[in-house]
Structure formats: structure tokens, C-alpha cells
Image (tube, helix red, strand yellow):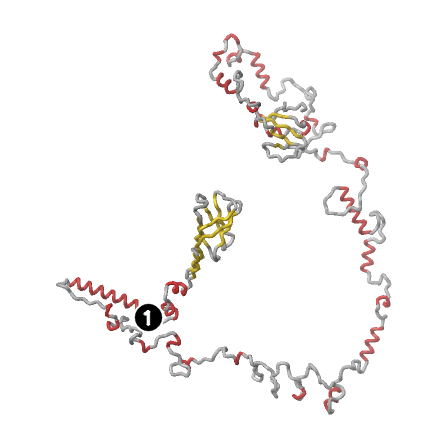
Amino acid sequence: MPETGYANIAADLTQLKAIPASERVDKYCLLVPSERSWFQFVADSVSNADGILIIAPDQGSGRWHRLSVTDHGMLAGLGDDDHSQYYNTQRLDQWLSAKSTSHLGEGSRLYYTDTRVSANSTVTANANHRNAVGANPHGTTAAQVGAIPSAEKGIANGVASLDSQGKVPSAQLPTLSDTETQQRTIDPTLATPGNTGNLMQLLSWLAGRIRSITGKPNWFDTPDTTLAEAATHHTSTANPHAVTAAQTGADTVGTAAAYMNAHTNASHPHGQYAFGTDLSTHSSSSGNGTHIPTEGIVNANISSTAAIAESKLTLASDAAANVASRRTLGTGASQACAGNDMRLNNSRPPDAHKSSHKTGGTDALTPTDIGAIASSEKGAASGIAVLGADQKLADAQVPGANKIAFTPAGNLEATTVQAAVAELDTKKQLKSQTLTDLSALTTTSFGRNLLARTSGANVYSYLGGISSIANGSGYHKLPDGWLVQIGSYVVSLDANGNGTLLYPVSFTGFVVPVVSNGDTGVLGSSVFAIGPGSTLNDCKVTVRPNPGAGNVRFNLIAVGI
């Protein structure tokens, strides 16, 4: 390796990477004490630099490779401290810790104390001279040390300075002449890819564009027509090409006017059509006439005041068949009614007719028809109970099994009897109120249908509840809209231990899900976690520690709306 300031040692990796390309030699080794390793430079290496085993220099190509032998202790199996006869750092620190200045001979004068330094004028002068940093006590000049004076930066006959970007300022750069830039040849055949390129490319693209506009072999050839001349020609209305009418297939001037005048002045230019006088002549003559074909006038517009015999008219496409009046179909007073008219359909809205359904009417309804109880069943056997004026059942309507017989045994205190009577009265009132509530409930179709349910499941379904559970998995939708989903589901996890669990049915408002391990025999010590899904159709699940990709069973409880 060339002579450098690194002395075959780079203090750390930063200094190793900073070695310039001019000082790096292929297959040369450097010791890096901070890494306790030797690094060898391989000039043609393009290995991926990981910052540990392979180091890329800050500039240029090649790589520094860490060698496998990193310190003395790895050489031929030797230990880190195999020369105990020498002082290493630890043994030297241990030896010095037990020493002081008293161990040095006083007469030897091998060390200085503050007193000795103060008394020695030579030592003091040397110390002052050494500490005169920046004072240039020797008056050394730049020429004496082979340096350039700072005053020569950026001046005539001096040296160029650098700006904050490390470049020479443009003011200190010379102006290039045409002779110095030399001759250049552009290529007008280059295709123009865009607006960015070097000077030669830009000039070549411009020359190519000019050549394509002029149509000439060379971009510098004089065009046949200038743009100004082309613009004048383009906007000219004076027939610059002297085109004749014959060349364009047009009539000569005056021909069209002559044709129009002859047509206008003709007495009967459209002989294929009939005059009004022709129709008058036809109407006063017998037979089909000679001006109107025997098949009649088809799709003609006839005035509202025209008088045409009905027998002469062709029936309209929607006219009623075989009807002398030839009335059309519609809903008007003078129109005919079609067979599929809503007015002929039994499903049309009926007229008011409630009187016909009254008792004694032509179409009377019975209480059973409307889900009611006949008034004749009030108080009758197998009928319904009747409440008295006090809104309570009469004693005669209370079954004997529910009556309370009271036979005192011995002498009872009056207060005891009064308490018993009060309790009986309270129970009687509660029973009466219950019957009242049930009676009120039966007055509505909802109440009657609710009481007609024969099981709790039927009542649940009637109130709007939905239950769909199979093999322990499914959902319950409560009558008030709440949704409870439960079950055990297998989820496919990705390589990161994450997956998506789909709900049996979608929530519409919000959801609070909880999961657990669905198979404690597998991953029994793992944590099963859950997070919000991308929609209300699913939730995100994960297992930690990560088991990797595979199928895992989750237990789910999700509550929401």
C-alpha cells in the first residue's frame, strides 16, 4: 500500500471507508482496532455491503472484507494473554496502583514537581513557548513551509476559492471562446424524446424538427414557402388555385338562378300531386275519379271541419271491432272499454260498502270472521268472564278451587283477622288486575295472536326474534335488533400468524367480538387476539407466538347490532 497517514491501521470503520481510491491497493490488509479485526481490500468485489463483514468505501468501487482471524487470541489457538512475562494494560494498571512518587529516587531528578517546574526558568520558558498556540512565536512564513498564503485565495495570479458547495464560483471561471469549445457536428436525424438533454442533443433535435417542417434534405436549406406565405395562402378567399366550376362539378354562374325562376313560374311544377280544384272536381263526380287511386287516401291529415262519410274511413288500429260507431278504446265517456281494463277486474278498489257487512246486511260478517268473540259469550259457560262495575270478577265467576274458606280455630285477635282479610283483598285485587290486563290484550289482533302461541319458541319468533344455531355455531337475533353470534370456526393464518374470521351474518351498526383458542390441545399456551375488521362482515385475528401459516380453530362470541 502507498505511504499514507493511516500507517496500516484505521482507527474505526468510518476511517476505513474514508480512505480515498488513490490509496487503496488490491489485496492489502488494514487493522481496525475498534473492530479487533483485519480487513482486506478486494478491488473487483461487488458483494452486498452489510456494514459488518463487508464494508463499501465512501467513494469508488471495491469492498473491504473482514478477515476470519480477528486478534492475537485466534492465531494458531493461542490465548489472548499467552505472554505473561509482558505487561499488558491490566497488569500495568495493577502495578502502578501500588506506586507513588516516593518510589522514585530523590536524587535522580527523573520527574518534575510543581515546585521544581516553577524554579526552573528553562522549563517555564519552554512551557510558555509550547502553549503559545496560534501566536507563531517563530514568525514562520507560508513560503518557509511550502504553503500558499491565505491572501492569495480568489485574487489575480492567486488560487481559486471554493463556494459552500465545494465548487469554484462562476465569477472565477474563464469565458470560453469558439476556438476553445472546438467545432461540433449536430445530427438532425435524432428523434426528439423530450425537453431534457445536453447541448448537442438539443441542437440536433431542433435541427431535425426544422427539417421535418420544411421538408428539405437539410435543416439549413431554404424552404419553398415561408410560414408567412403559407398563412396568406391559407386565409385567401380569392380562389388562389383558379379552380373552375367544371373541375368541382358545379353549375356555372347563373344556371341555378335560371332553374329556380323556371320552377317558380311554372303553373304546375309538381304534377305528381293533386290541386285543391282536383279534389273538388273529384268530390262532385261519381266513381273513384281519375285523380285519387282506388285504394283511397292513406294516413292523410283531414281538417276537423271536413265531412267524410264514415263508410269511407279505414278503422283505427285500436278501434272496437264490429261496432258501427267505430269508437276507439279508452277511458273517456265516448270510448270503448277493453277486456283487460282495470274497471272490469275484481281486484279493483271497491266502493264504500261497510253497511253490507253489518249484522242483518247482505254480506254480514260474524265475530269469528274478524277474530272476535261474540257478545253472547259474555258470562256464558265456556265463554268469557264479565267484570263488574268495580272492574272485578264476581264471586260466582271465580272457580271454587281458587276460593278461600276461612274457619277460625280458637279465639283469634281482631287484628289477626283484619290482617288476613287485608291480605285476601290484596290477592283478589292482583288477580282482578291480571284478568283486566289479559282482557285488554285480547282486544287487539297482536295480543290475540301472542296469546295463541303454544310455546316460548313460537312467542320468540312472533316477536321478531330469529335463532339459527347448528352444532353449537350460529346466531340469535333478538326482537329489539341486537345480534349475538357464537360458534367455533377454523381460520387460515398467513406466515405472520394473522387471519380473517368471517361472521355467520353481517352486522350493520357496530360489533364487539371476543375470541379464544378453539382447540386447547393445540397451541394451548398461545395468545389468541382479535382486532377490528375491514368491514362489519369480519374481524382480524392473530396468534402469538407466531405459529406460522396453517389452519387454527377459534371460539367466537360477537355482540352488536
Give the quadrant of the C terminus: bottom left
Q: Nearer the viewer, residue 141 or 14?
A: 14
Image side of residue 247 versus residue 121, left or right: right
Q: Which residue is mark 1?
A: 439
**What's the residue at 70%, 34% (across, down)?**
169
The answer to whether 269 is drawn above or below residue 108 in the figure is below
Q: What x and y, as percent, mark residue 302?
A: 68, 83
Image side of residue 122 versus residue 146, left or right: left
The image shows a total of numbered marks equal to 1
Kindly identify the amino acid type of the residue bearing the numbered disc 1: Ser
Q: Secondary structure at mark 1?
A: helix
The image quarter containing residue 75 is top right
The image quarter containing residue 560 is bottom left
Q: What x and y, as percent, mark residue 7?
A: 63, 23
Q: Nearer the viewer, residue 247 or 64?
A: 64
Question: Which residue is most to the left?
Answer: 411
The answer to whether 20 is drawn above or below residue 532 in the figure is above
Q: Nearer the viewer, residue 321 or 474?
A: 474
Give the quadrant of the N terminus: top right
The image quarter containing residue 30 is top right
Q: What x and y, as percent, mark residue 291?
A: 76, 86
Image side of residue 206 versus residue 21, left or right: right
Q: What x and y, as percent, mark residue 46?
A: 65, 34
**What's the residue at 61%, 32% (across, down)?**
54
Query: How would you rate the neighbour count of disc 1 (Cα within 10 Å): few for under 14, some for 14-19, many for 20 or more?
Result: some
Image side of residue 65 versus residue 480, left or right: right
Q: Nearer the viewer, residue 440 or 167?
A: 440
The answer to whether 161 is drawn above or below residue 337 in the figure is above
**What's the residue at 71%, 84% (across, down)?**
297
